[in-house]
Image (spheres, grey):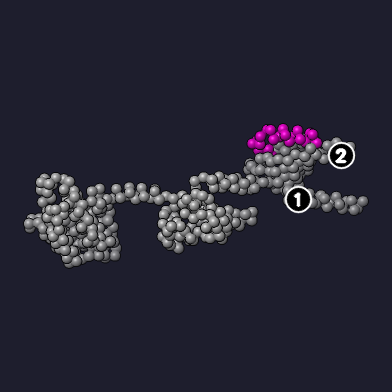
Amino acid sequence: MSALRQRLNQLSTAVEQSPVAIAITNTEGQIEYVNQRFVDVTGYSREELLGKTPAVIQSGETAPSVYRDLWETLKAGEVWRGEMLNRRKNGECYWEAEVITPVRDDQGQVVNYVAVKEDVTERRRQKRELELLATVFKTGQATMITDAEMRIERANQAFTDVTGYREDEVLGKTPKIFKSGRHGTAFYRRLWDSLFDTGHWQGEIWNRNKFGEVYPLWQSITAVYDDEGEIRHFVAVFHSIAERKRMENELERQATRDHLTGALNRRAFDDSLRQALEQAERDSMPFTLLLFDIDHFKQVNDRYGHDVGDAILKRLTERVASTLRTTDILCRWGGEEFTILLQGTCLKGAASFAERLRYQIAGARLNGLEVTISTGIAQYRPGDGMNSLLARADDALYRAKRMGRNCIVVKDE
């Protein structure tokens, strides 16, 4: 008798400590016993569950046909297996995989039902993610899967279309093979910080394809965790935004460039001049402003037509631009008038440059015609604003015209 009692105690302990939820009901479905795992999963105490039916944890979102099938199976004396969406005491829904078995007495009559339940919410979530990933693999989104060490394990056809690499060419390699060199260590540090802190990163990144071409991507990277919370995979989904960037650049060019000559327009030059003034005030960086226009340009338009005048403006812009450094800025100020901002240049250097430019323009034939320019020069002085600097340059230009044109006046007082 003691051996039987010991075996019963062992069985009771095993059921009570089982890692799966266990409930025993009578034939009417009223709960007679639940183990600790059942209490932990549902959030209800034993006192709140005993005598109740499993309706207490129903979510109301499981299809009625599931319950009909369950009871038809149990009434037939058979084991029922299935999944239900239930609700914890705190209102949170969760999925359970259940096996409900009829228990018979010595006469073969069903006297109880034993339900063994396993919380499969996470398993179903992972299944949905895998199904979603499988769908993504078949769509136009380029997709790449790596292990925790960023070694590539999978890549789809869209990945090949974007990068030029076949899947077999990248398996076992890391995304370092796509590095364009455009991003510094700070960029990648922010990327990894986001991935490890939040499990996700997305943004614009420049990569290099198989053929050496550098192109922009919009990329989303997601970390995939195992049950212990350790990263097991990274999933990167991306698409090329080269066309979008091209359109953005074109819109920017249209917004900042003169449509005829390609030089900066007045609005863009104002921004550049404002920045030069701020830098000069902050760093004592000298710069000089040149203001010049084409002599007797109205007569050219009247005599030869505006097509010839436009051609001269374009040719002159090309010639002037070819003499500038990368830090210098050329703008079509309006009509036949232009401005040049010479960074880091004093009056003497600016006057020397202006004289070379005047000589080159006068010695060339633009569209078959001799063309000369008149130039006014003003250098930044501490306390200058845009208006005061431009006014001095404009005054110098006016004096150059009064002196007979094709000459230079420096405004140094």
Counting from the top left corner in percent of width and height, residue 48 is at 73, 41
Q: Is residue 11 in view?
A: yes
- Magenta residue span: 57-77
Q: Residue at x 9, y 56 (%)?
A: 405
**Type of amino acid under label 2:** Asp
- The residue beneath circle 1 is 18
Q: Which residue, as the protein is rendered here, is positioned at the far right?
A: 1
Left or right placement of residue 378 versus residue 110 in this view: left
Image quarter in which the C terminus is found? bottom left
**Mark 1 or mark 2, which is nearer the start of the sequence?**
1
Counting from the top left corner in percent of width and height, residue 349 is at 19, 66
Q: Quadrant of residue 88?
A: top right
| 116 or 89: nearer the viewer | 116
- The circle on residue 395 is none
**Type of amino acid under label 1:** Ser
Counting from the top left corner in percent of width and height, residue 358 is at 14, 60
Q: Quadrant of residue 47?
A: top right
Q: Residue at x 46, y 57 (%)?
A: 210
Whether 66 is among the magenta residues is: yes
Q: Is residue 302 above or below residue 348?
A: above
Whether 314 is among the magenta residues is: no
Q: Main secondary structure of the magenta part?
A: helix
- The circle on residue 105 is 2
